[in-house]
Amino acid sequence: MRTNLDNMKNQNILVVGLGRSGIAALQAMLKLGAKVSVQDSKRQEEIDPQLLTFLEGRNVTCFFGMDPKETDQFDMLVLSPGVSPELPFIKRARDAGAEIIGELEIAYRIGRGNYIAITGTNGKTTTTTLVGEIFKKAKEKTYVVGNIGVAVISKALTAEENSWLVTETSSFQLETIRYFKPVVSAILNLTPDHMDRHKTMENYGKAKAKVFENQDESQYLVINYDDKECFALAEGCKARVVPFSRKEELDFGAFVRDGYITIRNEQDEEISICRAEELSIPGSHNLENALAAAAIAYFAGIEPQVIKKALIAFQGVEHRIEFCGQVDGVRFVNDSKGTNPDASIKAVEAIKGGIILIAGGYDKGSSFDELIKAFDGKVRHMVLLGKTAPKIKETAEQLGFTNSIIVKDMEECVKEGFRLAEPGDTVLLSPACASWDMYTSFEQRGDHFKNCVHRLEK
């Protein structure tokens, strides 16, 4: 349901969380004439002074380091993705009749344009970026937004009716949708992540499946056929289900035939897009990302020749298996976006030769058994940091891998990794954990790693 913008005037709205998306939601709500309050767990002295000046100048009521007591005053709460809808003051507001939504939902309601919504445990950012590149090559008016780092609402108000918003959507963002309805949705895979928030894989899967809950028969869901837990989420989907497979040839969807990325459409026609070996992005997981991107673009109406050109030209995304230097025959690769064990497994599989793995960080409740089992002789040493370092080291030793050391910071990680490496090895930062114990984001962590590598090079 798209909203008449006049409906937002004089609405009493609480924006919860002042990260990137929260600030963008705040600015949009003020622009539309709403009466806005904000809440953030940080104390006032921890808030950016420029933001404080902005808030004071617009008479915004602020609850910093505290919860609002009188929650029945709000018509709507707009939650940032990192905020749990189960916080006590949010539940009180819901019980009092307030609508609880997120920035993605409010952007959809008040903005214009056609949505592509891409979710999954891993590969979201690469696939979203790649789809965005395909649409741009097709000369479509395109915005690449969402969990990728650009708030959806910051572009939704300026988008035109025929614009495309290629949107990376996280499980946190999808928890708070109500009417959000993409033209094409996609679920790339499903492996354990964010168990500290979702508690069970069933809950996590249900959050991901919300991406298609409002779609109808005229729309499409692109979904991983090889990942059976993922594919099972499509049960009950009203949209046309488009499977993609790296391992099997399909009667319909995207797959590999004779080395070519191939699409079989609704008319039972086969369209060869390009050879899989023409992709510049390494690893079988990136072949899956390319298959998903090709299917998304094709069923959204993009010509196969345009899809081919974009796939072949795409060089990857920063912080995703990103080569960032070589010193005395030792390669350094930044995969800071490897924020869960499955992502790090894919990075290990994509690297050729011996690996010194830098891992560890904030604990999201993950098990690291499968990561250690995936070493398969390729990982020769682990250098660990952050809160999960002891947990990963203990898991490794229980499984017979004893070449692990714990260090205090990234600089020491890079130095130790280089000391342990031999010419031809790769020092790989793929933490299998979030960054929040030591960094504000995985980007900051990856940038620090690259800076440490550059200091080694001098």
Image (tube, rainbow, N blue to C red):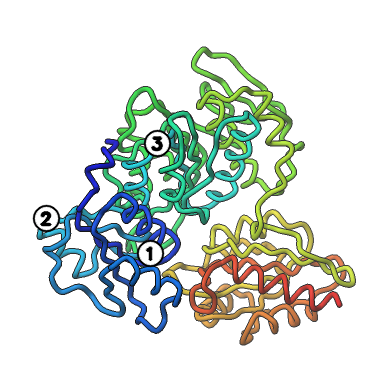
Kind of element beneath mark 3: loop
Disc 3 to disc 1: CB gap under 8 Å: no
Disc 1 to disc 2: CB gap under 8 Å: no
Residue 172 horizontal/vertical position (percent): 37, 56
Marked residue nearer the N-terminal end (1 or 2): 1
Q: Residues within 10 Å of mark 1 (few under 14, many from 20)?
A: few
Marked residue nearer the N-terminal end (3 or 2): 2
- The image's mark for residue 82 is 1
Distance, label 3 to label 2, CA atoms, is 27 Å
Residue drawn at x 45%, y 33% is: 160
**Quick check: 255 above or below 171?**
above
Kind of element beneath mark 2: loop
Quadrant location of residue 313?
top right
Residue 147 horizontal/vertical position (percent): 47, 54
Residue with the mark numbered 2? 97
**Mark 1: amino acid:** Gly
Residue 71 horizontal/vertical position (percent): 15, 66
Residue drawn at x 74%, y 67% is: 355
